[in-house]
Image (cartoon, rainbow, N blue to C red):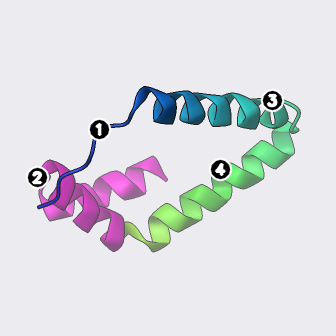
Amino acid sequence: MRTFKALTDSDIDGKLESAAETFRSYRRTSFAERASMLLRAAEILEKEKDHFGRLMTLEMGKPIQAAREEAVKCA
C-alpha cells in the first residue's frame, strides 16, 4: 500500500542522538512522572483502539478484532 525510503546513515545517527538526548532528561524524571506518562499512553490506546486496530491490520495483516484487543492489552 505504501513504500518507504530507507534511512541514510546520517538519518540513523540523528535518530540515535535524539534518543540519547531524550534519555538524558527522562532518567531524571520521578517514578510518579513516569507513571503519569504511562497512564496517559494507556488512556490513548484504549480510547483509540479502533484506529490502532485498523493500523495494525493494514501494516501487519492482523485480524481487526485481534488488533483491537492487542491495543487494549497493551494499555
Q: Is residue 20 above or below residue 4?
A: above
Q: Nearer the viewer, mark 1 or mark 4?
A: 1
Task: Bin the neighbour count of mark 3 within 10 Å (Cα to Cα): few under 14, some 14-19, many 20 and up.
Answer: few
Magenta: main secondary structure equals helix
> Which badge, 4 or 2, is on the more N-terminal residue?
4
Q: Is residue 47 above or below residue 37?
A: below
Task: Bin the neighbour count of mark 4 within 10 Å (Cα to Cα): few under 14, some 14-19, many 20 and up.
Answer: few
Query: Is residue 20 found inside the magenta-colored segment of the image?
Result: no
Q: Which residue is mark 2?
A: 61
Q: Is residue 54 above or below residue 57?
A: below
**Front residue of 52 and 20:** 20
Q: Which residue is mark 1?
A: 6
Give how far across and how far down residue 48 sits, in percent.
43, 71
The alpha-carbon separation of the residues under discs 4 and 2 comes to 27 Å
Q: Are marks 3 and 2 in contact (CB under 8 Å)?
A: no
At label 4, the amino acid type is Leu
At label 2, the amino acid type is Gly
Give how far across and how far down residue 72 sits, in percent.
40, 58
Q: Nearer the viewer, mark 2 or mark 1?
A: 1
Q: Nearer the viewer, mark 4 or mark 2?
A: 2
> Which badge, 3 or 1, is on the more N-terminal residue?
1
The part of the chain drawn in magenta is 50-75
- Which residue does the image show at 65% across and 61% down from the upper left? 40
- Which residue does the image show at 56% across and 57% down from the upper left? 42
The alpha-carbon separation of the residues under discs 3 and 2 comes to 37 Å
Give how far across and how far down residue 29 sits, in percent.
86, 38
